[in-house]
Every structure is written in C-alpha cells, then in structure tokens.
C-alpha cells in the first residue's frame, strides 16, 4: 500500500515537472521572439568602459518607455509603449499629469512608438507615431483590430499636447510585429519615419508588395520602408516614383527598423534593422536604398541562392547595397545616434552610437574619412559579429548593463541620453568634471 502511494506521488511529481518545463520553454521562446517580452541578458547596473565618463539616472519607474525628445533644456517628453501616455520630465521630475494619454494597441510590437519635436517661431510641434485603437489600451490583445499605425502632429501648449493633425495613416495589420516607429526631423526639415513589413512577408499575394521585393507583388501600401513627408504631411519629391504612396518612400526593403539618424558631417542617413533571429544590420541609407528584405537579410554572400536580379529596383531608381555591419546571433539593434558634440570629449565628436535591446549594450563607431563606412577592428573586418563574445566586439562596446535600450538622444547640453525599456529609466552619460 505504502509503495503504491509513493509510486503515485512520484508519477504526479514527474507530470508537474513536465508541465513546468513546457511552460518555461514556451515563455523563453516567446521572450526571444518578441520585442515586448525580451529577456535582457545584462540587466542590472549600467557601466561604461571609458573611465573619464559617468552615468547619472535622470528618472526611473517608467512603464516600458520607448523613446524621448527634448522640448527645452532639461525638459523631456517620454513615451510609454503600453499605457499610451506621453510624460513630461522637467529637471529630473516627472510631472503628475501626462501631457497626453491616447488609446494604443500594444500587443507585442504595437505601441506608442516614436517621437520627434521641432519649433516654428513660437510653436513647439510634437510628432508621434503610434498604433491607434478605438477602445482601451491593449484591446487588440482580445481581438479588436487597431485603426492603423498613425503619425500625428501636436502642438505643445503649457503642459498638454493639443490640436492633433493626422499626417500619415499606415497599415497595422495583419500582425502585431515589425511596426517600426522611429521618427526624426532631417536636415532638410522633413519628417522621416520607419515602418517594417507589419508581419506581412510570406503571408500571401494580397499583402506582399513590391517594396518588400516581390517582383510580381501588389503596389506599395506604406509598409517596409523609411518614409519622408513634410512637417505638415505633404509628400516631397519622389525618389522611386510619383504615385502615392511610392512617392514618399526614401528607402524600402526594410523588415523592421527601430532607429535612424543623419550624419551631421556628410548629411547621409543611417539605420539599424532587425532580422528574423539573425542578420541584424547597420546600414548606410542613401536615397532610393533597397535593404533587400524579403530576398536577403544580412550580407548578400550569406544567402546561397541570392541574385540581385531578384530584387525590385523600380526601373533602376532603387539600389541595393550590403550592410556595413551584421549580427549573426541577434542583438536587436535599436537606436542610432550621431553625437554632434564635444561634451564627452573630442574623441567622440560626430561619432555613431548604437543601442541594442537584447544585450543592453551601447556600441561606438568612428566612420571612415568619406563617412560611408564604419571603422572596425581587424577581427571584424568581415563585417560580421557571430556572437556577443566574438573577437573584436569588446573594442566597439562603449557601455553595457542598460537593460534593453530603445532610444539614444543628444540633449541640448551635448550629453548622451539613454532610454531603457528593461529598467524603466532614462540615463545621462556625461564627462567627469
């Protein structure tokens, strides 16, 4: 009797162990797949490898912050991915009431995603990219479809964002991944916006477009590119064609991008791009750039059957080029920022900084004299990073332990600011006095 009871107990324990193992496996796989549930490998106390610099915490306790913008000295607007709140931080203090609270779809990569700000005479304009929903925050998780990925222009009046003007209405379906959402103001004063393929690749002919390099695909619909419009929502001169929306594409063939910035020296645009578990990229983005998705991700030489003739070039107006750096073991590069400042020392002036979401690292790059490539150590001359510990990687790591970086910005003080979605914080990197 006793032996039978012991046998039953052991059997039950084995069953419970198997269930637990299955559950933990499911969540660990999900964490690797989905931006919103990333398990940060180096979460903890941030550190830098330049002993002349220091890290200060500007604010903590934010809920999944995605990006930030300065609207004045010590005056920051920061976005929260899931709550739909735009919070204002003045001299390190979060104001009690958000300047805006909107309804957002927030499943996986749907979000309140991107922000940029500009000033015209006496008016401060704030541009927001978010996945809008007619309902409560997160209703898309229960099956309600979002209205779209939308770009609005607001005016900052006191402690509120008012007078919303819809500038762009982009697809938010069929899936909740690859929404992109970074926004910047270019040196031409136009608005540049990233959007990924929104989960449509390999989903059938009705959503596979020419700007995703389907030769016989349907016409472009705003997905899979870097888009350019004026600050009041008007299309600029077309690069790939004159029809709308093709006219607003500055670049295409982009699977998903969370970061763009202009080199202040050359005026060239650069981006980061996330691959499907491999092939993350840093790219030089010249007008008409074709990043290659869905035909190629990473270096063309890594694709056995790839031929450039497989790509859509819009009658020769588009052009493919290989990335300047590729991660094989995904790092999830997000923000890219050129530091147009000497506040951290002249060695960093006009250099590129890139953050990643999986390792919580900041990478630092010098550019070649023609500003068209990255200066890499000999160990990375192949332009390929196999894994975080690969030879040569330590020489480009500027800092780590930031718990998943979603934005890098330069403040009006010339210092570098870091948004950590994993730690719910904003950090300042400055020189030790």
Image (cartoon, helix red, strand yellow):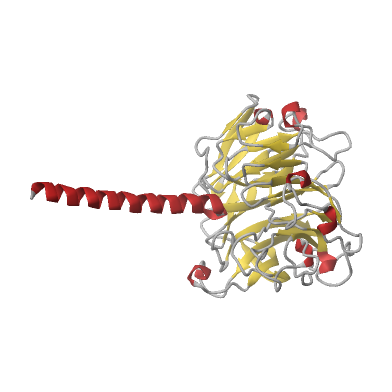
Q: Looking at the image, is 184 positioned above or below residue 237?
A: above
Q: Picture quarter containing residue 358? A: top right
Q: Is residue 317 visible?
A: yes
Residue found at the very far top of the displayed protein: 51
Q: Looking at the image, is 308 positioned above or below residue 54?
A: below
Q: Looking at the image, is 413 positioned above or below residue 52?
A: below
Q: How many marks?
A: 0
Residue name at image x 62 percent, y 74 percent: 147
Where residue 233 sits in the image (x, y, percent)? 79, 68
Q: Picture quarter containing residue 228? A: bottom right
Is residue 41 rendered to the left or right of residue 287?
left
Residue found at the very far right of the displayed protein: 316
Q: Picture quarter containing residue 429? A: top right
Where residue 116 sits in the image (x, y, percent)? 71, 56
The one of 397 and 330 positioned closer to us in this rendering: 330
Where residue 381 sits in the image (x, y, percent)? 77, 32
């Amino acid at each position: 009797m006793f032996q039978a009871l012991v046998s039953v107990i052991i059997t039950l324990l084995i069953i419970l162990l198997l269930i637990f193992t299955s559950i933990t496996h499911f969540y660990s796989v999900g964490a690797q797949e989905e931006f919103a549930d990333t398990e940060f490998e180096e979460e903890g106390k941030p550190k830098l490898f330049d002993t002349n610099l220091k890290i200060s915490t500007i604010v903590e306790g934010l809920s999944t912050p995605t990006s930030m913008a300065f609207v004045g000295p010590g005056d920051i607007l920061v976005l929260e991915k899931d709550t739909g709140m735009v919070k204002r931080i003045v001299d390190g203090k979060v104001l009690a009431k958000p300047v805006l609270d909107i309804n957002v779809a927030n499943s996986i990569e749907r979000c309140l995603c991107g922000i940029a700000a500009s000033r015209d005479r006496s008016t401060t304009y704030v541009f927001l990219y978010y996945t809008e929903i007619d309902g409560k925050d997160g209703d898309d998780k229960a099956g309600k479809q979002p209205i779209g990925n939308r770009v609005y222009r607001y005016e900052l009046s006191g402690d509120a964002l008012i007078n919303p003007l819809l500038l762009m209405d982009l697809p938010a379906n069929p899936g909740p991944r690859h929404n992109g959402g970074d926004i910047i103001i270019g040196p031409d004063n136009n608005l540049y916006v990233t959007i990924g393929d929104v989960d449509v690749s390999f989903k059938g002919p009705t959503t596979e477009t020419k700007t995703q390099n389907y030769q016989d695909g349907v016409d472009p619909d705003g997905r899979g590119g870097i888009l350019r419009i004026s600050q009041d929502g008007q299309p600029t001169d077309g690069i790939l064609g004159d029809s709308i929306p093709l006219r607003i594409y500055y670049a295409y063939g982009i699977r998903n991008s969370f970061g763009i910035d202009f080199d202040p020296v050359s005026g060239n645009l650069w981006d980061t791009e996330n691959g499907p578990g491999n092939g993350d990229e840093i790219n030089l983005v010249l007008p008409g750039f074709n990043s290659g998705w869905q035909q190629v991700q990473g270096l063309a030489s890594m694709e056995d059957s790839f031929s450039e003739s497989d790509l859509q070039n819009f009658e020769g107006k588009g052009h493919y080029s290989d990335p300047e750096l590729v991660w094989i073991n995904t790092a999830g590069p997000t923000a890219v920022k050129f530091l147009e400042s000497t506040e951290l020392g002249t060695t960093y002036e006009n250099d590129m900084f890139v953050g990643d979401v999986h390792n919580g690292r900041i990478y630092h790059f010098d550019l070649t004299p023609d500003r068209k490539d990255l200066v890499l150590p000999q160990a990375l001359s192949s332009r390929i990073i196999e894994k975080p510990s690969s030879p040569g990687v330590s020489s480009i790591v500027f800092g780590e332990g930031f718990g998943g970086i979603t934005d890098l910005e330069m403040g009006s003080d010339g210092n570098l600011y870091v948004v950590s979605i994993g730690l719910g914080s904003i950090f300042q990197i400055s020189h030790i006095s």
